[in-house]
Image (cartoon, helix red, strand yellow):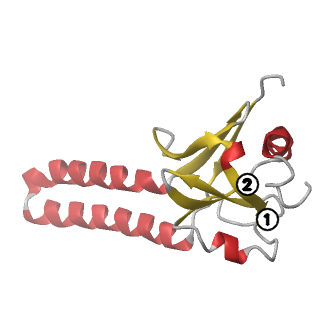
């Protein structure tokens, strides 16, 4: 087979809870600056600066993207925080995938209930291009939900085989 390389970035949509956290952090920073300015004027700027950097660091964990990289049978899924830090969610050969199916495919609930851990690596909304798979990874059964595009699915199909890919895509 020829070498295959496909890469895809999926940005997670912000939830209402995350927007409320952002607003609360901004409000706390402004409130603390005003209070410190009123009571301790000479310390207002350093306090505001420290609060701003602390809030910026904590809020960076709310900007999340997922990167899928498929290279000649190997699939890597990374979680990227604020386009600066990354965490590896999964890496492995797709031949180790036990079953892969669209998330709305019925009849495989018992298989996916065996998963000890589930990772949602989607943009937040499940659609027709949202799939889940079960794999033994680091001696645990894990379930990963992801959104590969058509070209990535086409590249994965020969490596997956029909026994693991439940529905033709």
Work out whether residue 28 or residue 104 is closer to the camera in this orientation and state it. Answer: 104
Q: Residues within 10 Å of mark 2 (few under 14, many from 20)?
A: many
Which secondary structure lies at badge 2? loop
Q: Which residue shows up at 75% across the image and 67% down it?
A: 103
Question: Left or right: 159 with respect to 63?
Answer: right
Which residue lies at the image location 66% right of the left edge and 70% below the top edge?
112
Q: Answer with left or right where residue 163 lies relative to residue 72.
A: right
Task: Kindly indicate whether the residue at mark 1 contacts the one at mark 2 (C-beta within 8 angstroms).
Answer: yes
Q: Is residue 127 left or right of residue 58?
A: right
Residue 31: percent from left, percent from top:
26, 67
Instruction: Examine the image and state in which quarter residue 123 appears.
Output: bottom right
The answer to whether 12 appears left or right of 82 in the picture is: right
Q: Is residue 106 above or below residue 116?
A: below
- Secondary structure at badge 1 equals loop
Residue lying at the far right in this picture: please name it: 168
> Closer to the camera, 106 or 22?
106
On screen, residue 150 above or below 166: above
Residue 49 image offset from top left, x and y in percent:
23, 48
Q: Which mark is residue 147?
A: 2
Residue positioned 24% across, 55% down in the render: 51
Residue 61, can we see it?
A: yes
Q: CA gap, disc 2 to disc 1?
A: 8 Å
| Residue named by callout 1 | 127
Q: Quadrant of the C terminus?
A: bottom right
């Amino acid at each position: 087979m020829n070498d295959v390389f496909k890469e895809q970035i999926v940005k997670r949509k912000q939830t209402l809870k995350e927007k409320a956290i952002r607003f609360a952090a901004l409000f706390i920073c402004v409130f603390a600056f005003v209070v410190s300015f009123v009571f301790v004027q000479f310390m207002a700027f350093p306090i505001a600066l420290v609060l701003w950097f602390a809030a910026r660091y904590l809020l960076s964990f709310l900007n999340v993207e997922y990167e899928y990289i498929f290279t000649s049978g190997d699939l890597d899924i990374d979680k990227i925080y604020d386009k600066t830090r990354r965490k590896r969610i999964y890496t492995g050969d797709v031949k180790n995938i036990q079953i892969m199916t669209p998330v709305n495919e019925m009849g495989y609930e018992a298989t996916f209930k065996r998963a000890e851990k589930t990772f949602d690596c989607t943009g937040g909304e499940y659609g027709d291009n949202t799939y889940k798979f079960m794999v033994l990874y680091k001696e645990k059964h894990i379930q990963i939900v992801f959104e590969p595009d058509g070209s990535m699915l086409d590249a994965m199909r020969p490596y997956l085989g029909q026994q693991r890919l439940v529905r033709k895509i």
